[in-house]
Image (spheres, helix red, strand yellow):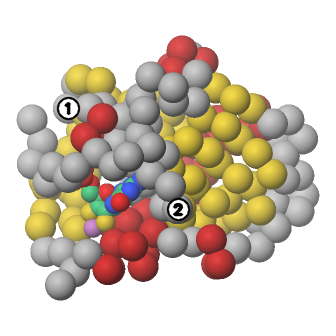
Amino acid sequence: MSDLEVHDVPDGVDPVEWRLDVTGDVARSLSLDRGALADFPKQSFTADFTCVEGWVAEDLSWRGVRVGDVLDRAAPTERATHALVHAMDGEYACSFPLDRLTDAVLALELDGSSLPVEHGGPARLVPTGDADCWESVKWVSELELTDGAREDADTAESIALSRIA
Ligand SMILES: Nc1nc2c(c(=O)[nH]1)N[C@H]1C(S)=C(S)[C@@H](COP(=O)(O)O)O[C@H]1N2
Ligand SMILES: [Mo]
C-alpha cells in the first residue's frame, strides 16, 4: 500500500451517495455516477506526493480519468477560464486554470485497487506535474466552470496551511 498519511474521513463524505457534477459555464451540465465516470478511458501514472506538513509518499501509482475528457463532454463555454473543484467535505474547494486542470486525472484507483475513501475515493484529483498538496482534492464532487479564478471560494490552501502548527 501507499505511504500516504491517513487522516480522518470528515462529516459529509458519503461514497455511496457520491456523484460528480459538472456545472457553471458549460453548454451541457453533467451529473455522473461511479459507473458513468468509470466508462471514460483510463490512464495511469506514477508520482511522488509531498505534503507541505513535511512528509512524502513515494511512487504512488494512480489510475483514472483525464479531466479534459470529462470537460469535453460538458463543453465549457467561451467564458470559462477556470474551474472550482469542490469536495464532499463542506467548504473545501480549489480553483484551477482550465489548461492545468485538463491534464489532471480524476483518480479512481491507487496502487491497483479502488481508491479507499480515506484517501479520497471514489475520485481524487491528481494534478500531473508540479502541484501543491492541497491541490490533490479528495472526494471531488463538482467541477464548477467559472469566468475568472473565484479566489473568494478557493479555500484549499488556507485550510491546508491552518493544519500546520
Ligand atoms: N477534500 C479534501 N481534499 C484534500 C484535503 C482536504 O482536507 N479535503 N487535504 C489536502 C492535503 S493538504 C493533503 S496533504 C492531502 C492528504 O492526502 P491523504 O489524506 O490521502 O494523505 O489531501 C489533500 N486533499
Ligand atoms: Mo498537505
Where does the image place residue 88, in percent across and percent down from the top left?
A: 49, 46
Looking at the image, residue 31 lies above or below residue 141: above
Res. 44 in view: no
Q: Quadrant of ligand 2?
A: bottom left
Q: Quadrant of the N terminus?
A: top left
Q: Is residue 121 left or right of residue 2?
A: right
Q: Nearer the viewer, mark 2 or mark 1?
A: 2
Q: Position of residue 89 (x, y in %)?
A: 44, 51
**Which is more toward the observer, 100 or 92?**
92
Q: Nearer the viewer, residue 20 or 90?
A: 90
Question: Which residue is at 28% across, 45% downward?
Answer: 9
Q: Residue 141, position in %: x, y?
A: 55, 42
Residue 146 in view of the camera: yes
Q: Which amino acid is tagged 1?
A: Asp
Q: Residues within 10 Å of mark 2 (few under 14, many from 20)?
A: few
Q: Identify the residue position indicated by label 2 in the image.
A: 91
Q: Is mark 1 within 8 Å of ligand 1?
A: no
Q: Quadrant of residue 152?
A: bottom right
Secondary structure at badge 1 equals loop
Which structural element holds mark 2?
loop
Point out which mark residue 111 bears. Answer: 1
Give the residue at x 22% y 49%: 8
